[in-house]
Image (spheres, rainbow, N blue to C red):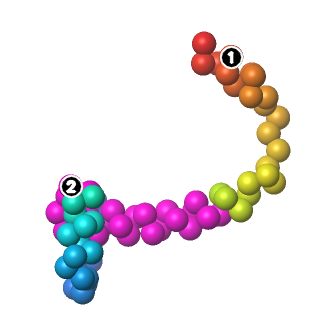
Amino acid sequence: MKSAKKITVHIQEDLLDKAQKSTGQGITETVRLGLQLVAASRAYEQLRSLRGKVKFSVSIDKLREDRE
């Protein structure tokens, strides 16, 4: 496991309650998941910027053949 950093975070109680209900996890896991989603959002943004700019040499029909 990578090293961890202990921090103090001030979060509105109702926001934390909603987030915990959504994740079904405790405070630490909920905050960790939220931070992972924020970090991933940049990668998603970069991928969206490539939409329509990347050419694929494989056809959809060829890809579907692999499923059978």
> What residue is rendered at 62% in x and 64% in y?
45
- Residues 28 and 14: in front is 14
Q: Which residues fall within the magenta stretch?
A: 23-46
Please state the horizontal and vertical placement of residue 21, each as a whole percent of the image. 22, 60
| Residue 57 visible from this viewpoint | yes
Please state the horizontal and vertical placement of residue 7, each as a whole percent of the image. 24, 83
Q: Is 37 contained in the magenta span?
A: yes
Quadrant location, the N terminus: bottom left
| Number of the label disc, if any, that sits on residue 24 | 2
| Residue 29 visible from this viewpoint | no
Classify residue 32 by image quadrant: bottom left
Which tag is nearer the camera, tag 2 or tag 1? 2
At label 1, which amino acid type do we have? Glu
Q: Main secondary structure of the magenta part?
A: helix
- Identify residue for label 1: 65
> In this view, which residue lies farthest toward the left?
26
